[in-house]
Image (cartoon, coloured by chain):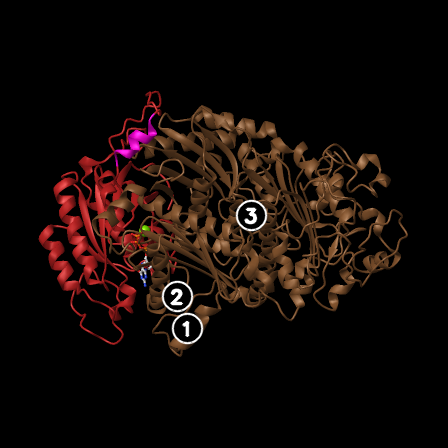
Amino acid sequence: MDRDIEAGSIDTNNNNNNNNNNNNIQKNQSNNIEAVDHVPPLPPRPSRKLSDDGASGALHVTAASKPTTQVSTIDISTLSFPDGSRGTFSTSATSATRSVASPQSSASGYTSPRTDPTAETVSVASYPATLRPPGDLADLVTGEFNRRSRAWSMLRTQSSSVQPFEASRTGACDTLAGFEKEFDDIPELGDKGITDEQRLSLWKSKMKHYMILSSAGKPIWSRHGDTSLINSYMGVVQTIISFYEGAKDPLLGFTAGNARFVISTQGPLYFVAISRLGESDAQLRSQLDALYMQILSTLTLPTLKNIFVHRPSTDLRKPLEGTESLLSSLADSFTKGSPSALLGALECLRLRKSHRATINNAFLKCRSDKLLYGLIVAGGKLVSVIRPRKHSLHPSDLQLIFNMLFESGGIRAGGGENWVPLCLPAFNNRGYLYMYVSFFDSVDTAAESQETNNPPSSSQDGGPPPPQPQPPKPIPSPDEEIAIILISADKESFFDLKSMRDKLALQLAKNGSLALIQSAARQGRPRIETILNLNNTQLTTESQGQGQGQGQLSHFLYKSRANVQFCQSSLSPAFESPLSSSSPGPSSSAPEKGSSVTTSSERQRTADKLLVSRRRLMTLYHHLHSSIHAKHSHLKVLHLVSEDAASLAWITPVFEFYCVAGPNMSRGVMTQCANKVVQWAKREEERLFIIGGGVF
Amino acid sequence: MADTNAPKPSSSVKLVLLGEAAVGKSSLVLRFVNNDFQENKEPTIGAAFLTQKCNLPTRTIKFEIWDTAGQERFASLAPMYYRNAQAALVVYDLTKPTSLIKAKHWVAELQRQASPGIVIALVGNKLDLTSDSAGTAEVSGDGDDNAEDSGDARKISTEEAKTYAEEEGLLFFETSAKTGHNVTEVFTAIANAIPETSLKSARGPGASHAGVSRTEEQRVNLNGPRDSHAKEGCAC
Ligand SMILES: Nc1nc2c(ncn2[C@@H]2O[C@H](COP(=O)(O)OP(=O)(O)OP(=O)(O)O)[C@@H](O)[C@H]2O)c(=O)[nH]1
Ligand SMILES: [Mg+2]
């Protein structure tokens, strides 16, 4: 069996130990946890289990029993466990988090609503039928409407607009304290006024570390710290890993303090992730896999094997030279929290079906015979794909490409057109492909150089605006950059692909597609207000509805499982500065647009705040994701309320849905919102996702 | 940089930049093409293709520039870029001795393998890091000073590089992509050095590239991408 050691306690259940180390981070989320799964029918009984981890938690506790009338008893402060709950949902907040992932021990067993509606429908009768189309979430999460007390409602009306994570923003025991410094460099050895100890403590203050070393113990790469700083740690890591390796009982992970160590061995390479951000082992492991893929992408598998077969003590840093920044930007995207990586899915630019078809057709018409894959990407979102019938593109390969183009600056900053040999390991890890890349703003289409001076605002939406070629001078924010990526197996095909690109660019400009792409990219992601107020009308009013009535969802992720794609709502205003739609990441070097008179330190503070609040959001998503995907959990819906936020995860064979709202959003409202969003996504499916793409 | 008035004859020149990693090839191109400089430029992956016009009194030269990656694992791809080049910029970092050795290797390889008439310029970059950078107007001309002056990071004397360049018949410049010193001069000198006879018209598709047929109609079966690229285990 795979070994899993822990400082202090041995975990008996491999599947559920993921969150052990996260107690500090996540205990706030465990005040009120409900889970729904496939456990066989149980006698009817209340569904909520309560735990309390402190004085403030008391007020968040909702009614334990499930009255069927609006006016009901309320137990604002009780800790009473519903009778029949399996009791392991202990008052100890520290173990509560873990329990989420192990429904055997904690979650209340709902039956699948259709198979046994009696189990939990005591109070469902009063639902208006219209709220429950087949498969409606309300079937799964029941009871909310009927169990609000006056006190509870009063409390809620006062604070319905509380945004998620406001508590922890001000909280004293902020687990993300210092996260805004996470990506700061550690000063070099010789830097003035910095002692070795200071450097070491800076290094130790990082919440996330990644290390790659050879099985012979040679350091290959680490996210933080130079060789002098980390060499000895690498040695220790190597010793520990190879000890278990030698015992034919590979070490997969362990916990020390509040840091989780996860180890992944790939042939002659060891990958280590050390995290205090609360990801599950599986999540950390997939991050390590991505780093491995990046190495394969540089070297190919046969080359990597060869290197180590001939000289096991080879220093791999030399052959990987220059890709450190790719590894780092990949790692940083995980540390910041990437929905795409979490869900293993891609994000597409939302476009009308007919518009996308026009683009696909133009793309196919211009196709060079040398082409293997063709992609148009705007701001890291896929616009169009064309591919041979028998080959599809793997998300993990695209992740590497997107990382290279949009996260790390190398190619984008260079200007011009690029010809990049790379291996796409999921496609074929044995050889190189050649990737032609050009960004629209850098090599602008000389043909259509009419100068327009429209500021990058998101004012126009609705109908297709008239073609407005991007003015060449103002550099678009990373969110708006449009790239054409053409991949061939022929290393000599640069000029074929270049001429294909030129033709395509001309076509797209001529038929108005380029302007459509630009305006869609500028418009950004759909806003929740718009979706929830949509009522089958088109997206028209963007600004209305914010904060009206009950609080609104703050953010959601929706993954279409069949398409391996996801969409998400706009991060603003809660997680993104409404002023600029560009990402606050430190890597984005796009100059500030507009002439806002904010000082740079002010801007930095805002950027820091957003970085942290986004990480909070992503930490919660990671938590939801790992809980609902935990082996043997068979969860369908997970509703989580904490001091910080209310959140919901909902999985069906068709989609995965995750959303987050302020802590006071009632479950009923949340359920309604979730339903609306899911219905919206279904309606908009062909706009949100690329279905099939252009095939040749 | 656009053409001004009366139509001058215009021709295109294929130029390749070679040199050790991080000597400043991309920075020189960025300075030449965009008149810009980035302090922490990331390494080039593969190669970048850029174009820039250069106005001479009698004609306009359109440079088609291949900025190659200096990292060792891309070395095997280099022939693809210099094969049809009419000019090459071989760049070294004058604060880094190994980079001149590498530059000499490139020069030798070009002399062996590239088109016979290729114009080669040897360029020592990062002049701004040397003490003689301050007020120099014509560094390229007089190679004299160097030595360990105050705060001088120079490791390769002008004399040494210049002598070598003369022996091999190369153009020679010391530049700073950071300050822009001597950058356009290099390209102008190359443009001037290209023999009139080897200039083709820039117009028309005939600016044939890399020996690859560009006919769109040519049927290539993509059936076996796995096979076809497995066999070229290059780029590393
Ligand atoms: N001080 C100074 N620094 C320079 C100069 N030119 C380039 N640099 C810096 O040197 C580093 C490498 O420059 P690049 O232009 O990326 O070098 P390169 O030759 O293209 O490197 P590869 O693409 O890896 O082959 C960057 O950090 C530049 O900012 C210069 O003239 N002076
Ligand atoms: Mg470069």
Q: Which chain is red?
A: B
Are labels 3 and 2 on one chain?
yes
Residue highlighted by disc 1 = A199
Horizontal and vertical percent for residue A630?
57, 47
Horizontal and vertical percent for residue A141?
74, 44
Residue highlighted by disc 2 = A225
Whichever of labels 3 and 2 marks the residue nearer the N terminus, that label is: 2
Whichever of labels 3 and 1 marks the residue nearer the N terminus, that label is: 1
Residue highlighted by disc 3 = A339
Are labels 2 and 1 on one chain?
yes
Task: Give me the chain letter of mark 3.
Answer: A
Q: Is residue B230 magenta?
A: yes
Residue found farthest to the left: B167
Say what secondary structure mark 2 lies in. loop
What span is in magenta? B224-232
Q: In the rendered structure, which amino acid carries the disc numbered 3?
A: Pro
Q: Seen in the image, is A93 located left or right of residue A420?
A: right
Whether residues under marks 2 and 1 lie with C-beta atoms below 8 angstroms apart, the answer is yes
Q: CA distance from mark 3 to mark 1?
A: 32 Å
Say what secondary structure mark 1 lies in. helix
From the viewer's side, name the closer residue of A74 and A436.
Answer: A74
Q: Colour of chain A?
A: brown
